[in-house]
Structures are given as C-alpha cells and as structure tokens.
Amino acid sequence: MTRIPLDLGPPLPQTGSPAMNGKDTARLADLLGFILLLLMCCVLAAPSGAQDDMKELNTRFVPIYTTSPGTGLLVINVFAEKSLVRMDRQALLKLVNLNTQVATWQTTDAASEGMFNEIPYGDYDIEASAVGYIPQHTRAHVVQSDRANFEIVLHRDPAAIKLDVADRVMLPKARKETKNAVTALKSNRFADAQKHLDAAFRLDPASAELNFLLGYLYLQTKDFEKASKYLSTAATLSPHDPQVLTLLGRANLERKDYPAAQTALESAVIADPESWLPHDLLADACLHQKNYPEARDQSQLALAKGAKAANPARLVLGEALINLGQDEQGVQALEAFLQEAPTHPLAGQLHDLITNVRQRAAASASGTPEESPTPQVGGVDPLMALSAPDLAVKTWQPMGVDDIKVALVPGYSCPTGQVVFETGKHVAELVDDLMRFAAVEDLLHQSLDVFGNPTRTETRKYNYVASISQPKQGELAVEEFRDNKLGLDGYPDHIASTGFAVLAFVFHPANRDSFDLNCEGLGEWNGRAIWLVHFKQRDDRPNRMHAYQVGNVSYPVGLKGRAWITADTFQILRIESEMVRPMPQIKLLSEHQVVEYGPVRFEKKKTSLWLPKSAEIYFDFRQHRYYRRHSFDHYMLFSTDAEEKRKEPVAPPAKPS
C-alpha cells in the first residue's frame, strides 16, 4: 500500500470554540472535502475482489427491473406497522386489472419488495397479505412511465394466533422435557411435572400439547383459573380434540362459569359424539343454568353411551327430572346411582335429598305443599361423583391433520382452481422429466413406547431407484427398488415402507379427481408465503394412491392430508397425510406421513428438479408403534446424465444397530 504524506497545517480548534474564525471554517471545509475525495479514490482503486463484492452487494439490494415498451412496471415495498420496518416474512401481492378483473400473483423477496412488469396501461387494485397481518389495498393508475413505486404498510391482526406449522413435530429438547413431565404426572409428582413443563413451554409456547398438559396439571392442583387459561389456548390451537375440549369444559364447571363450560362441551360432543363423559358434563352445565329439559336429554345420552361407567350421569338426570316435576322418576334415577355405588361419599346427601322429595310429595298429596322442602339444584354437586380426569396423551406421533388450527391470513379468499391447476402442472412435469432417477437412501427405524420413547433403533442404507411411467392415458405406474429388489428380510421388523416419495401425485391430473381438494387460505412456511390445500380421498372414486399389502392381499388405504404450496411458483414444499379411517382388519390403527420436497441441482445438465428430500412415518401396526425417517441424497438421473454418479463407492446396506 502506498503511503501519502499529508501536510494538514496547524491543528484546528474544536468546532464551536471561540478560537474558530472564518479562515478556520473554510480550511475545515477544504479538509473534509479532501478526505471525502481521498475515500472515493480508495474505493475506485480497491482490489478487484473488493470491487466484485461491492458489485454483488449493489446487485443484491438494488435490483434492475425492466419492462417492454408500451407496458408499465410496478414496484411494491411492504412494511410492517407504522415504524416502516420491512416485513420479517414473505408477503403475497395480488394485482387485479379493474377493467378485465384478471388477477396476477407475485411474492416479495428477502428485502420485502415485489415487482410486476409487462403491465398494460390502466387501473389496478394492489392487495398485500401476510400471515398475522390484516390485508391492505391500494389503487394504481398505470400510465406511460418507466416505473411506479408503491409502499404498503400492513398492521398486525390482533386476533391472529402465533402458530408455526412446524410446531406439529415438537423440538427434540421440548419433547424430552414433555416425556419426563408425563411420567411425573402419571405418578402424581406435580412439582416435578411443572418443572419439566415450564422448561418445555419456554421452548415451545405455541404447542397445543404443552398447553393441554399445563391445563391438566393445574386442574389436578385445583388452580382452576390457570387450568382454564391453558386449556383455552390448547382448544384454540387444536379445536377438534375432544380430550382438550372436555377437560376445558370440566375446568369451567369448577370455576362455575357455566356458559363457557357449555360452549366447550358442545364442541366436545361434536368432536366425539360416542363418548359419554362430555354428554354428562354438558348435562351438568345445563342443570346449573336451569335448562332442565336439555340436562335430562344429555344425561340420558351419557347413560346410553356409557352404561355402568356413566353412573354419575344419574345424578344429573335425577335432579333434572325432580326440577321438571317428575319426582318419582327422579328418585328412581338417584336410587339407581346408589345401587351402583352404595358407599359413595355423596350417599348421605342423596338419601337426604330423596327423603325431602318424598316428604314434599306426601305433603302435596295432603294439601299442604308449602310445608314440604323444595330440593335445590346445587344441593348435590354432580362433579363430586366423577373420578379425577385421566391423562391420555399420544405423545408418540404428531397431531392429526384436522386437529390443529393453522395460521391463515384472515378474510383472504384462495383461488382453489388456479392453485390446484398450477400445482398439477408441476407434478405432471416431474413425471415427464423424471421417468427414472436414483439416490442414496438413509433409513432410521424406531420402535416406540406409548410416550414416544425409542425402545429399539435400527439404521439402514439403500441404493434407491424409482421408475415412473404412464402405461396408458390417465394412469401412473410407480415402482421403487432397493438393492436388487430387496425382500422383507432387508427391512426392520419385516415392514417395507414405499410410495411416500410420490405423495405429491395427489395433485397429478390423473389422480386429483379422486380427491376432494380445498384451498384453506394463505399461510406461511419458514418465512415463505404458501397456499394450504386440504385433500381427502373420495369414497365414490377408485383409490390408486396408497395400500398395505399383507401376504398376497392388498388393502387400499384412503388418505387425507394437507399440502404446503409456494404462493409464487406453486411448488409443493411439504405434505402431511394420514388415514381417513383405521383398518382393524389388518390391525392398522393409525398412520401419519410427513414428506418434504425441494430443488435438487444436477450440475452436469445445468438443471434443477423438484424432488423429495425426506419422509417421516408414524404408524400403529399390529399393536406396535413405529417411527421411520427416510432421507435422500446423491441423486442421479439415469439415461440422461450418468456422469452425475458420485465417484466414491456406495456403501452396502448397514446391519441393524
């Protein structure tokens, strides 16, 4: 580096000092100008690498947009709140031509900026949406101009739930703390359970499971306010879970908030109409609100569904009938309860109540009803007849597809037809471009206990080959091979898991008519704007997607699930699926798949293809619980570019660990 001697003259007084005169001010200005010029020269004379870095930064933060002559260019910057901070997530931009009503979609980049070019002149509506924010509109008049800039400020939706879809599979450390908490709860060690739950909750506060467990803990320790708080959150995150809703109703009954209890329990009855307990608790809530006909009906439903186990419902039934003026039937219900539980702690109160009712009936018959005591609704608390709530937590698999409330942009309509059509085009391209590919597959297999703890772990490595063909119009044939048609002996527990790699074929034009497809709305996945599409196998269409083969018999399995699809390119990022219904004939009680996709680069062909990256499977088969994770690497295209194959030898299948 060349050193340049500078004669800057005598030191300058500090700015604002009495010694500062006009000449000093001028000399200071000249000096600052010289230093600025020197800095500019240093930049111009910087090494080529530094210039390249600056050029890269310039390209990254100041993109160059172009458009054809006779068309307009719109650049939209999206900010959060009034502070004009750029969004921390991708926003979806919708441009609607007000003359033709044709909509065009775009997403913002990492700098929260989006662009529409080749726009015909005219009037447009611009809408910006992002998860957790209220959508905003602005009008644009596109005229002959090089570029029109717009700024849109989004405000947070106060009713939005902060829920990351990825929370469905809990963080490993939080999962470990949760398992320890469940063990402590089972042993009534509530202090230990709270310590573990608090630690897990700090890591994963949006987990429906953790909120439920905290609600259960506080219900057991009789802190009903806190129990209701956590259970309400769990019910919001998991609005179709009957266990959560039932426990929330019970907590609200303990708080004597009977309207809130009724609301939760009505939802629990809808979620699980065959369980007697929510009917019984709902009858209790109606009894305390003096809705005696409904209390009678719900308690009778509880008895019909629970038989002897529903004996506590006879208390509500008896009190409801007595308050409806049907004394004899009410007494019979109470006596039936005592016959089943003669030594119950409530037996004394019930005998007194029965005596009072009979005295009232006798007084009424003698013409002196005013002397007979009238039984009170709260005379015997039906909750005291119930045992402590049981803890039945399925911690070994993710929550069901329909059991979680995904975070969506409120009030934003999803173009289902366009999303399904565009996604199907990409899936069809995958079939056309990828008739045969190979990869190295790593398999992790675990046998689990009821809490999800691995009791045995095995790992395997396979040479994986998939062949996709279309034997005739409207049909797809998918074959998977592992190490020269590996038999069942080569798989852990003699169970082969195949087909998950092509779960995206739900959206293929040849298959999608076999499913009910519904775009639920605009969501977010790892900062990207995505469409969430729910699918379910139709009963009136053939099932060609999924089956279990036991011996020589194949059992088709209907699937339902949800897909995460990029809002700008309509590529599938993630699919979760599960069985529409259990299959007890082969002892398959549950199955849950999570498959993630992404771009795979083939350098020799200078192309990228969208392929499965990993697949997780949880299944309850023949009274055993299993977890498997398949991951893929070292992809290779056959017949098109054999040079993609890596030079190192492929390892043989590993022995079970």
Image (cartoon, rainbow, N blue to C red):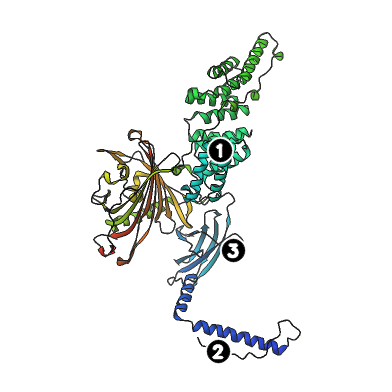
In front: 289, or 332? 332
- Can residue 430 be seen from the camera position used here? yes
Q: Amino acid at mark 1?
A: Arg
* SS under mark 3: loop
Which residue is label 2 attached to? 4
- Can residue 535 be seen from the camera position used here? no
- Residue 423 locus on image (x, y percent): 38, 54
Q: CA distance from mark 2 to mark 3?
A: 44 Å
In front: 562, or 482? 482
Q: Amino acid at mark 3?
A: Leu
Which residue is label 3 attached to? 84
Of tags 2 and 1, which is closer to the observer? Answer: 1
In front: 247, or 401? 247
* SS under mark 1: loop
Looking at the image, is mark 1 or mark 3 earlier in the sequence?
3
Of tags 2 and 3, which is closer to the observer? Answer: 2
- Residue 460 locus on image (x, y percent): 32, 50
Q: Amino acid at mark 2?
A: Ile
Q: Along the horizontal axis of the image, is 289 left or right of 635?
A: right
Query: Which residue is most to the top?
Result: 366
Callout 1 crowding tier (Cα within 10 Å): few <14, some 14–19, many ≥20: few
Corner quadrant of residue 355:
top right
| Disc number placed over residue 189 in the picture, else none | 1
Callout 3 crowding tier (Cα within 10 Å): few <14, some 14–19, many ≥20: some
Q: Along the horizontal axis of the image, is 656 left or right of 143?
A: left
Corner quadrant of residue 248:
top right
- Residue 75 locus on image (x, y percent): 50, 67
* Number of numbered discs: 3
Answer whether labels 2 and 3 touch (C-beta < 8 Å): no
Q: CA distance from mark 1 to mark 3?
A: 50 Å
